[in-house]
Image (cartoon, grey):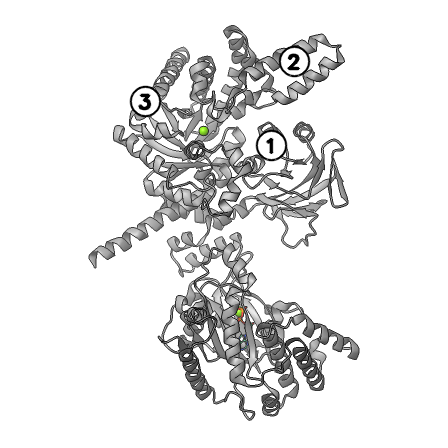
Amino acid sequence: MNKVVYMFNEGNGTKELLGGKGANLVEMTRIGLPVPYGFTISTEACNSYFKAGNCIPREMEFQVLESLKKLEEETGKRFGDPSNPLLVSVRSGAVHSMPGMMDTILNLGMNDETVEGLATLTKNPRFAYDSYRRFIQMFSDVVLKVDVFYFEQFLEEYRTERGYSSDPELLAEDWQKVIIGYKKIVKKHTKRTFPEDPKEQLFLSISAVFDSWNNQRAIVYRRLNKISDHLGTAVNIQSMVFGNMGNDSGTGVGFTRDPSTGEPKLYGEYLINAQGEDVVAGIRTPQPISSLQEEMPEVFQQFVNTCRLLEEHFRDMQDIEFTVERGQLFILQTRVGKRTAQAAIRIAVDLVNEQIISKKEALLRIDPDQLNQLLHRRIDDTFVRKPLTKGLPASPGAATGQVVFDSSEAERLSKDGKKVILVRPETTPEDINGIVASQATITSRGGMTSHAAVVARGMGKACICGCESLNIDLKLKQFKVGDVIVKQGDVITIDGSTGEVILGEVPMIDPELSNEFKLLLTWADGHRKLRVRANADSREDSIIALEFGAEGIGLCRTEHMFMDEDRIPIVQDMILAETIEEREEALSKLLPMQQGDFEHIFEVMDGNPVTIRLLDPPLHEFLPDKEELIIEFTKLQMLKSNFQELNKKKELLRKVSHLDEFNPMLGLRGCRLGMIYPEIYIMQVKAIFYAIANVLEKGIEVKPEIMIPLVGHVNELKEMRQLVITAGEQIFEETGHNCNYLIGTMIEVPRAALTADNIAKEADFFSFGTNDLTQTTFGYSRDDAEGKFLQTYIDNKVLPENPFVSLDQEAVGKLVETGLKLGKDTKRGLKTGICGEHGGEKQSIQFCHDIGLDYVSCSPYRVPLARLAAAQANIKSEQKQCIDKLQTHI
Ligand code: ADP
Ligand code: MG
Ligand code: MG
């Protein structure tokens, strides 16, 4: 067998071998910090233990005993020696920190003899018995599997009987009695006496710590954090130091910076006369670290110096465990501290300013996904929550408002200045106005990618989906959770980051785009090649997009401009028109409305490129629901009165049925609309060009890019391109203004990607519409897939991830790459980008960078994330190139 046991002063082991805790103990020993001496049994040993059928091989046992001897020599104490006993802790320590997930045993080596020795030696019997009872409890829990509950219950009863209110009040005699009680508990539950032989204790504990790698909470933690099950844990055997020796002793935890705000000041807690986990266990309320300054000024100063040293050494904020034994400081652990997004940014920026890390390192340290936390209003951290119920955390942020149950009601109330929260069993595209008007949306059905969730995330609004315990009664306008009834108009608060629903109003804090955050993003801008644009189709969204640093609009969806309450009747007239004249009349009313929208957007974007997509969805999306119409019609029919109304409904129903499609996603939509009803596209193009002319008139620069959706054959684009040019040039002539403009297409069906060389002949730019491209590549309709089988596929690992969230590089990505290559073969200067939700997802952004697209476009609220992710992609690929170069030299 290889060497599997290492003393703390033996060289510099890696985390993979010694685990995070072990490697850092070695490192701290090396730089001369006061670390109690000990040794580490490696992760390799753990795996041999599992291979041997959860059994410690002879050779490993031998190496452990050898190291134990060295520890005895170094400390001058002997294991099991009553005159001067060595006591140790047996601590788990995996490669990745898994705080509190596995087990640790303290004070090992205690028995009926050594406890007496310790009492005499320290002249502190109370301390000796206190340590012994702690050991019995921990050992019994971890090794003998006796539930701690029995010990706690016993101690609780003992305290009440004698009238003690807390543990420090117990005297030596009390602990002696508790020990007798504890041993009886062990006997009763294990049918054996408590093992008194220290070596037996040691090897049983080592096995138990190895075994704790596979306890339930460790397994769950690994799954959540994507940590491999095969790594195993190391075990650290370390001589004990005691924080429970009296009022000149204590134990605590400190962070070198505030982990929730990132402020560069010590943060932490400690307890006087306590051991190990007492601080986190919540039995006694710990004191803030600042008061250590008064209680033990020298120790405090030493701790402050150690913190600075450790931070500089490990070059990041540290989370440190310490113990003070009779006025002497010992460091027991250090690791990179977990932190909020806000703190992560502040710390990264500060570390750069303090010249501890480089800007590149700072950029790589922030997880782009974490940024979402910062761009939404959220519940004040100090508020104690009592949630009514919980659903899926579909879109982060918090909101308070009156409950409403339908979209038009939501709109009406919000126009009156009321804040509302829309509660629906589920939402459909028609609820878009309701979602816009509301502070937040809750649905009782649907998942993280349901309509409500996607829309809400796109708008940066809070949303909870699949809140199944909500019993919604749309007729009574109320919902029930258990026997709590919430009626329309009642106020609730939701937290979209946790999925919690809370009754009433709670204190909130605004999103912070702190100065550090802005600074970090400007660093990101200096390190990225990808440009970042936003998807926006209104003045308001464009303003937000610019504020967050978008360099243009990558997708302006004109259909959103049709959804407005005042416009939808005109849109319906346009669709239902019998003759071309009727249709043109409706279109002429829509034209100035759209023109106004475009003007606003151009003005805000002030010379940045704006990609406008002509109408894309099937027309029936603007019409009333067919099933509802049938019901209304039947009702009217039964009434046999209002015949005029009946005839109108009949006519409407006929037309709606006429437009009804078997599969709207693959039906009459995209450029097919423009091919069949050119007058609609012509109206849109005119609106764009009139808007251009007006904006130019005001002296504002414009960079319009007109985009034709869903092209599958070059001939479609050829015809639509001609349509745009004809209408556009006519208006330039009419208005006397003109400017450069681009005409391009979305590449969003496989045929387009595969014939991109031909299509590029008619296109000035490609925008890869990866939402539709995913649908058409997989042959999934998104709504059906997400509603019916996609989750099962992901759960059963048929698919690694939801391809609508993270781009499927294997196939969809291959099509994008193919389309890009073919397109550039035809036209070197072709502009290329992606729009759609993937443009705001870090892995997909990395992919876009790697294949060499010019830009990504995402919702305005994801622009900061995309800026950071684009910088990370570039830095990582530079680093990779560097390594590759080095390797070819070797
Ligand atoms: P975890 O990984 O769950 O934090 P640890 O192995 O760090 O578990 O130990 C639990 C507690 O016991 C910590 O508070 C630690 O500081 C304390 N502890 C561990 N070893 C010793 C020791 N040799 N002397 C004193 N306290 C110790
Ligand atoms: Mg610890
Ligand atoms: Mg599309």
Q: Quadrant of the N terminus?
A: bottom left
Q: Quadrant of residue 632?
A: top right
Q: Which one is nearer the viewer's eye here, 705 or 634?
A: 634
Query: Residue 639: x and y, percent?
Result: 76, 13
User: Hey, what amino acid is under mark 3?
Assistant: Glu
Q: How many marks?
A: 3
> Disc 3, ligand 3: is the CB inside 8 Å?
no
Labelled disc at residue 649: 2
Separation of residues labelled 2 and 1 (CA atoms): 29 Å
Q: Residues within 10 Å of mark 3 (few under 14, many from 20)?
A: many
Q: Is residue 31 visible?
A: yes
What residue is pinned by disc 3?
A: 762
Query: Residue 591: x and y, percent?
Result: 51, 16
Question: From the viewer's perspective, is residue 810 above or below residue 166?
Answer: above
Labelled disc at residue 436: 1
Q: Give the mark nearer the N terminus: 2 vs 1.
A: 1
Q: Which one is nearer the viewer's eye here, 105 or 534?
A: 105
Separation of residues labelled 3 and 1 (CA atoms): 37 Å
User: Hey, what amino acid is under mark 2?
Assistant: Lys
Closest to the camera, between mark 2 and mark 3, is: 2
Separation of residues labelled 2 and 3 (CA atoms): 44 Å
Q: Residues within 10 Å of mark 2 (few under 14, many from 20)?
A: some
Q: Quadrant of residue 653?
A: top right
Q: Give the mark nearer the N terminus: 2 vs 3.
A: 2
Q: Which SS class for mark 3?
A: helix
Q: Which SS class for mark 1?
A: helix
Q: Which one is nearer the viewer's eye here, 102 or 195?
A: 195
Closest to the camera, between mark 3 and mark 1, is: 3
Quarter of the picture for ligand 1? Answer: bottom right
Q: Is residue 246 visible?
A: no
In the shown orientation, is residue 660 left or right of residue 636? left
